Image (cartoon, helix red, strand yellow):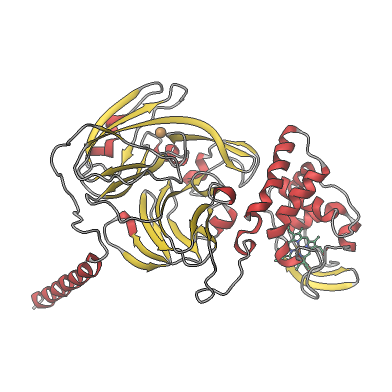
């Protein structure tokens, strides 16, 4: 009796699969094969072109399988992870994520892994596009100043993550040791106007988010999966401002999106865009009309869409605190004529970008640099504070500090502010709630604590407030904020 329903289900499933296959066959490249050998390499060996993110090597454009030589060097180096914050990255090719590798299905890849003599650690590489134990890891273990070599055949087409797999594996990945290898199908991918390389990773620094200076790796945070940063392309700002990805209206954009982890899964989304096609999990099935695609740690996807209207499209991990409070933000800047039939509006970068909106960052960069040199001036603080205020505080108190009648008290000519300059800093850190009188008007609302801001940021914002809109002036220094923070949250008193 049990046989009948089971076989029916199997039939239905088979029918379902058939339907799926025929639906996606139209969009798949013709004659795409899941696996294939295609015989021995032909012609002269070819040196693979490697690129640093966000660039992608040119299409293979070859009709036969070849021997492709990949030379990849591991370099350990200190680089910027955020404004005024550096980190000792371990890299494949000098960047995080590592160099993008592009080959053709059926190619024989002769892989040379070098480990720079200045390295302190041994490293290796596990390529998910390799069929064989460890994905190459055991054959590529390389001490500092050494080189190792192994060869594999790229049997399966697709987009694959590679990463270091030297113990402690999590630490090597957390330090930035991952990248992508694209194995093109024999006939190549369809032509598009732009191809870009974007890869997410989570980082675990000893200090909190945006805490200045060289930050060490924090193993405990990594084990507990509590990242201080979640980033695209290894650094905050790697894809914003001048580094934004670029396209024009009515162009096709292909993003190779990887997730190095080590821990987090990415909910990859571009605000204001719908992905026409996604090769989810990097596999050969194509999903269409996707808003957000899940990219597992150690996985990748190919995302394609056509730009329709100009503007700044914000790339995020839609686990949204990661985007606005841990750095997982990028921009695709699309230029060209408006199309009011598709979208009527006028763009305002700061709606989504807050203090990350491009033009503002220069002042913050300058203040950070001068603080490090010990030459920080009042004016530097005011300029940086202004940039940070817009996006952090201006949503409620307005850019001109006037507030909103009955809802958000004014900071302009505020007797509350002018009564005690240091109080601005503690207001930012601890928030305020309950009854409050500002310039004779009563407010009874809540301002949430903004203690995610670091000491420099609070000092600069407070200094900006004190010196703006006819307030009486004054200066709040980083040390002041540190002292206020150290005292902890005060009890909210009734006389507010
Ligand atoms: Cu390593």
Q: Quadrant of the C terminus?
A: bottom right
Q: Would you place residue 307 above or below residue 242 in this image? A: below
Quadrant for the N terminus in the image: bottom left
Q: Residue at x 43, y 25 (%)?
A: 116
- Residue 85 place in picture, x, y as percent: 62, 40
Of the pair 398 and 475, the residue shown nearer to us = 398
Nearer to us in this view, 315 or 201: 315
Quarter of the rendered image showing ligand 1: top left
Q: Which residue is at a point 20% across and 69% down the rendered structure image?
A: 22
**Which percent across, then down, holds residue 191?**
33, 55
Viewed as shown, does residue 21 lie left or right of 487? Answer: left
Q: Does residue 323 appear left or right of residue 469 in this picture? A: left
Identified at 18% across, 57% down, the residue is 31
Report the front residue among 312 and 470.
312
Name the side, left or right, on which 348 lies relative to 50: right
Image height of 309 relative to 460, above or below: below
């Amino acid at each position: 009796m049990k046989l009948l329903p089971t076989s029916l289900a199997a039939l239905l499933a088979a029918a379902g699969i058939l339907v799926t296959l025929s639906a996606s066959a139209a969009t798949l490249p013709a004659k795409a094969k899941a696996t294939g050998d295609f015989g021995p390499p032909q012609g002269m060996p070819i040196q693979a072109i490697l690129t640093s993110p966000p660039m992608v090597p040119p299409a293979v454009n070859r009709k036969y399988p070849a021997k492709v030589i990949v030379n990849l060097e591991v370099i350990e180096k200190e680089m910027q992870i955020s404004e005024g914050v550096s980190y000792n990255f371990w890299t494949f090719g000098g960047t995080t994520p590592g160099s993008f590798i592009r080959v053709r299905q059926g190619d024989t890849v002769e892989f040379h892994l070098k480990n720079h003599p200045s390295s302190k650690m041994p490293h290796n590489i596990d390529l998910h596009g390799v069929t064989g134990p460890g994905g190459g890891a055991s054959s590529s273990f390389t001490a500092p100043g050494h080189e190792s070599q192994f060869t594999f055949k790229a049997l399966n087409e697709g987009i694959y993550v590679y990463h270091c797999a030297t113990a402690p594996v999590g630490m090597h990945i957390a330090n930035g040791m991952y990248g992508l290898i694209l194995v093109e199908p024999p006939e190549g991918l369809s032509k598009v106007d732009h191809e870009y390389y974007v890869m997410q990773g989570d980082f675990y620094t000893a200090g909190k988010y945006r805490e200045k200076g060289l930050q060490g790796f924090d193993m405990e945070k990594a084990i507990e999966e509590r990242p201080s940063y979640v980033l695209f392309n290894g650094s905050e700002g790697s894809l914003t401002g001048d580094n934004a990805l670029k396209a024009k209206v009515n162009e096709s954009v292909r993003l190779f999106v990887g997730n190095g982890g080590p821990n987090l899964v990415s909910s990859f989304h571009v605000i204001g865009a719908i992905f026409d096609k996604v090769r989810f999990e990097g596999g050969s099935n194509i999903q269409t009309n996707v808003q957000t695609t899940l990219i597992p740690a150690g996985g990748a996807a190919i995302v394609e869409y056509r730009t329709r209207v100009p503007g700044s499209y914000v790339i995020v991990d839609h686990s949204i605190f990661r985007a606005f409070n841990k750095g997982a933000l990028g921009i695709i800047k699309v230029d060209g004529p408006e199309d009011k039939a598709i979208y009527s509006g006028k763009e305002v970068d700061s709606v989504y970008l807050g203090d990350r909106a491009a033009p503002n960052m220069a002042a913050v960069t300058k203040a950070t640099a001068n603080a490090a040199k010990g030459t920080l001036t009042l004016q530097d603080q005011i300029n940086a504070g202004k940039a940070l205020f817009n996006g952090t505080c201006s949503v409620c108190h307005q850019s001109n500090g006037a507030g909103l009648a009955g809802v958000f008290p004014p900071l302009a000519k505020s007797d509350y502010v002018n009564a005690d300059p240091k109080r601005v800093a503690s207001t930012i850190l601890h928030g305020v709630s309950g009854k409050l009188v500002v310039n004779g008007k009563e407010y009874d609302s809540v301002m949430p604590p903004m203690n995610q801001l670091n000491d420099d940021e609070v000092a600069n914002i407070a200094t900006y407030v004190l010196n703006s809109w006819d307030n009486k002036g004054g200066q709040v220094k980083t040390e002041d904020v540190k002292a206020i923070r150290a005292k902890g949250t005060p009890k909210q008193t009734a006389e507010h």
